[in-house]
Image (spheres, grey):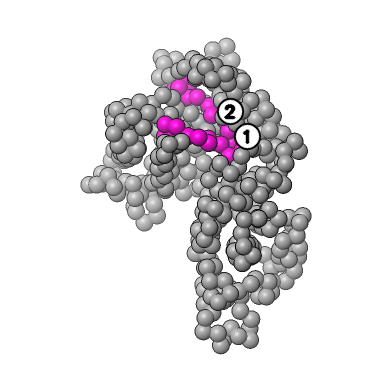
């Protein structure tokens, strides 16, 4: 299978995008693929948590796809887990989700995306069989409700792919992406790596599934950003690089701010003052309404900072700065509403962390200035004088917040914050 990957890239004159893994990297990949992953049932569903090594999950899904007459060209590890395998000094590195790419042929078969969905649900059903104390559900739809976090299907002239995300209670979600063709496969160079797993999976199935520095499978990694060594340099030096962010859904805006919050810095050879304008423009094209922006911000915070609450405020501060300085596509009122929403989220996060002082938001250095909380900081928060009289003021379940529906009609209470 690796030979097939080489042939595909060489035929396009792109062999510089490939690199064979070293022994230490193969060992790291083995640890990732051998570790148990936990697929959690939705709270209240009473479905058990499914625990299975990742390589076995890949094997089950692949077999189910084959049973549904879906051809799998190869399987790849992508995203943060792939970067972890390749990164220098990766022992201290962390990653959020586990991203697996199944390169499939679904555009040429009838109901290809539906067959993929059925294969994944059947795989979860197969794993449930091992739980003898749990009765199998009468309808496979119950399995979808219990374990599937989100599903996406894209089909047009340039793209044909689907995504099924499986829930993990601690935030390590399992993302299964089934790709026939995809115009844009990365946001930034540091997340552009794809490691072809077929040789490792074949090694696991061999009679002697142990390897050492003298005998280990030859595994290829590819950078879909461009030259492999350049992308690896960006990863090891923690540099942010991309091109044409207007091609990315959401413009890569949130990932850009996430990387900055994680200590990455921009590549000096690129004009990020221009790139951030494209990021903001694409983001507000894809999420034009304030309620859409809120849902996107809230879900991103939940998915990427579930184990690092302190970074949320830093991320929102950076996001505020970027939106304030680089947004050129919005009218004045729309821009103020977007900034107000980020301020609101930041206050909720600081309140949740029981911080009594916080910033006079929006300074260019992206840091909070200390100051006592004051209701007048946020547009749309009623003053004490008119709070009791104004019938258009809505008091929500968060202490300290009283929003005026006249001033900011689309900002709502943020329900994901839990107070004990």
Q: Position of residue 146 (x, y in %)?
A: 35, 49
Q: Please give left or right for residue 156 compared with residue 144 in the image.
A: right
User: Farthest residue toward the left?
Assistant: 138
Q: Name the residue under label 2.
A: 223
Relative to 4, residue 115 above or below: below
| Residue 257 shown in magenta | no
- Nearest to the observer: residue 42 or residue 110: 110
- Residue 262 seen in this snapshot: no
Q: Are marks 1 and 2 in contact (CB under 8 Å)?
A: yes
Q: Mark 1 points at which residue?
A: 189
Q: Position of residue 36 (x, y in %)?
A: 46, 35
Count of numbered labels shown in the rendering: 2
The residue under the point 63% across, 83% down is 384
- Residue 17 seen in this snapshot: yes
The residue under the point 56% across, 88% down is 389
Q: Give the range drawn in magenta.
A: 178-201
């Amino acid at each position: 299978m690796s030979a097939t990957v080489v042939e595909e890239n060489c035929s396009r004159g792109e062999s510089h995008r490939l690199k064979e893994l070293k022994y230490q990297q193969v060992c790291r990949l083995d640890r990732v693929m051998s570790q148990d992953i936990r697929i959690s049932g939705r709270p209240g569903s009473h479905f058990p948590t499914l625990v299975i090594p990742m390589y076995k999950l890949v094997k089950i899904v692949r077999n189910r796809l084959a049973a549904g007459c879906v051809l799998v060209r190869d399987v790849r590890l992508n995203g943060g887990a792939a970067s972890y395998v390749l990164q220098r000094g990766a022992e201290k590195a962390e990653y959020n989700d586990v991203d697996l790419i199944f390169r499939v042929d679904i555009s040429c078969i009838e109901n290809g995306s539906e067959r993929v969905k059925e294969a994944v649900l059947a795989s979860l059903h197969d794993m449930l069989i091992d739980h003898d104390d749990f009765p199998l559900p009468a309808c496979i739809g119950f399995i979808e409700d219990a374990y599937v976090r989100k599903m996406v299907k894209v089909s047009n002239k340039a793209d044909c792919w689907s995504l099924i995300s499986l829930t993990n209670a601690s935030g390590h979600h399992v993302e299964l992406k089934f790709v026939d063709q995809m115009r844009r496969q990365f946001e930034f160079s540091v997340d552009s790596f794809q490691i072809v797993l077929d040789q490792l999976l074949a090694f696991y199935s061999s009679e002697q599934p142990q390897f050492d520095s003298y005998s280990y499978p030859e595994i290829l990694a590819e950078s879909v950003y461009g030259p492999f060594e350049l992308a690896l340099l960006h990863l090891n030096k923690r540099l942010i690089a991309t091109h044409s962010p207007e091609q990315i859904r959401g413009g890569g805006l949130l990932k850009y701010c996430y990387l900055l919050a994680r200590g990455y810095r921009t590549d000096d050879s690129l004009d990020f003052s221009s790139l951030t304008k494209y990021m903001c423009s694409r983001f507000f094209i894809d999420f034009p309404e304030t309620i859409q922006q809120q849902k996107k911000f809230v879900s991103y915070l939940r998915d990427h900072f579930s184990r690092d609450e302190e970074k949320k405020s830093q991320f929102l501060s950076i996001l505020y700065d970027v939106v304030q300085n680089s947004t050129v596509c919005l009218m004045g009122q729309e821009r103020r509403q977007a900034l107000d929403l980020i301020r609101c989220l930041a206050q909720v996060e600081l309140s949740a962390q029981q911080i009594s002082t916080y910033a006079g938001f929006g300074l260019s250095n992206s840091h909070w200035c200390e100051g006592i909380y004051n209701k007048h900081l946020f547009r749309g928060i009623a003053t004490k004088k008119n709070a009791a009289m104004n019938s258009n003021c809505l008091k929500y379940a968060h202490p300290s917040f009283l929003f005026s529906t006249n001033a900011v009609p689309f900002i709502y209470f943020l329900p994901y914050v839990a107070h004990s």
